[in-house]
Image (cartoon, rainbow, N blue to C red):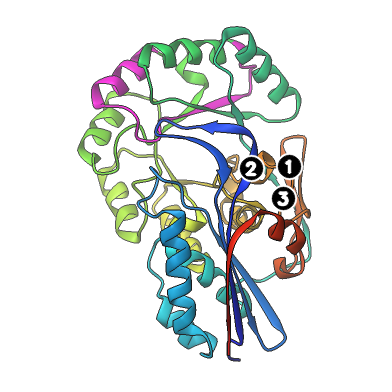
Amino acid sequence: MNIDRISIYLTSVPLKQPYELSFSTVSDLESIFVKIIAGDKVGWGESTPLPGYTSDSKFSVYSNAEILSREIIGKNLEDAKRIIGFKDGFSRSAPMLAIEMLSGEITWTGQTKKVPLVSLIKSKSRDTIRDEVATAFKNGNHTLKYKIGGNVADDLERASHILYALPDGAKVRFDANQGYSFTDAVKFVDGLCNSKKVELIEQPLKVQEWSGTRRLSQHTDIPIMLDESILTEEDIIKAVEAECFSYIKLKLFKCGSYKKTERLISLALENELKVIIGNGVSTALGCFLESKLWDKTSELKLAGEMNGYLKVDMPVINDITEDRGMAIYKDQNIADLINESVLAKYTVSKKELYL
């Protein structure tokens, strides 16, 4: 089966509300989609690079998708996979996912699936934080998440409001997105008033600060999760050998392919690392595929973070929904579910390649 046609879309999908991180505020999901046609079959892939999280930009990913597409047009699927390679990176994930879909490496059960989702708390004042926590728990979200990594005193004050309002049976994840120095991270973990309700602290220090992150993990009983630090098999082994990390975060786009993400999940679980799946700045296509990957970790019963599709008004796939804190989807071929009229509405640039 040879590749006959490739379409590459650069899109900008506005969020319902700005999404604040330690390094930037996101107002739009700037995603690159790739549609590949081979014979009578269609495959789709997505990549949503986030400046500050990755060195890739929307323009570099869009450009690289075109370069790779020119190299694989007319090739059979196996040759196309070899050309793209199974390396990590946002630049490869969109065409690789489309090819994995075409080649049958992503399979579909036809079953309706449910995945527990984390709920992001966005408020900053005491009363609105407490109201938002209560609403999230009432809606069925038993795992909440809050972004930190700025001023430590402000972060601790807001954390105290969250922990005060958090009902029994609920947990919170604090995500610093590499925003802290070692000193500030120590101040934060030492200043938490009820750490038993804290499930974990995510990526408190810079990617390269393995030594500092190890010392922080040894300093506190609160589990530390690595996200930006984990891209490859070697990174997972490094985390295992450190003997002080409990969790890692995996996202489809940073891994570069569906099959590679599966391999990394298996490697982590074999080495007794807990794995959290999900990308809060992916569209419904990526969230759908990450919901499938969550099945590999379902015995851990950890809330997934593939909730980017809930942040927009018009998702490119309507067949993944949410109810009572659960992502709900029917595990069917995603190529049949893409709403191309919605995609066209948000497309700012498009490339077409034909044989």
- Label located before the other in sequence (2 or 3): 2
In the figure, is residue 124 to the left or right of 214? Answer: right
Task: Please name the residue that numbered disc 1 is placed on.
Answer: 313
Q: Nearer the viewer, residue 54 or 12?
A: 12
Q: Secondary structure at mark 1?
A: loop
From the viewer's perspective, is the residue at label 2 or at label 3 nearer?
2
Identify which amino acid the numbered label 1 is placed on.
Asp
Q: Residue at x 34, y 53 (%)?
A: 236
Residue 348 found in image quarter:
bottom right
Which of the two discs, 1 and 2, labels the residue nearer the N terminus? 2
User: Magenta span has 180?
Assistant: yes
* Residue 88 found in image quarter: bottom left
- Residue type for callout 2: Pro
Q: Secondary structure at mark 2?
A: strand
Image disc number at residue 301: none
Q: Mark 1 and mark 2 in contact? Answer it, CB < 8 Å.
A: yes
SS for tag 3? loop
Cα distance between the residues tagged 1 and 2: 8 Å
Stretch in magenta? 165-191
Vertical relation: 310 (above or below) 291: above
Q: Residue furthest left?
A: 211
Across and down, in percent, residue 261 comes to 48, 61
Residue in view at x 37 percent, y 45 percent:
228
Where residue 149 sits in the image (x, y, percent)?
39, 26
Q: Are marks 2 and 3 in contact (CB under 8 Å)?
A: no
Q: Which mark is residue 315?
A: 3
Answer whether residue 264 is visible to the viewer in this image: no
Residue 264, quarter of picture: bottom left
Q: Which residue is mark 2?
A: 14
Image x and y of residue 226, in percent: 38, 42
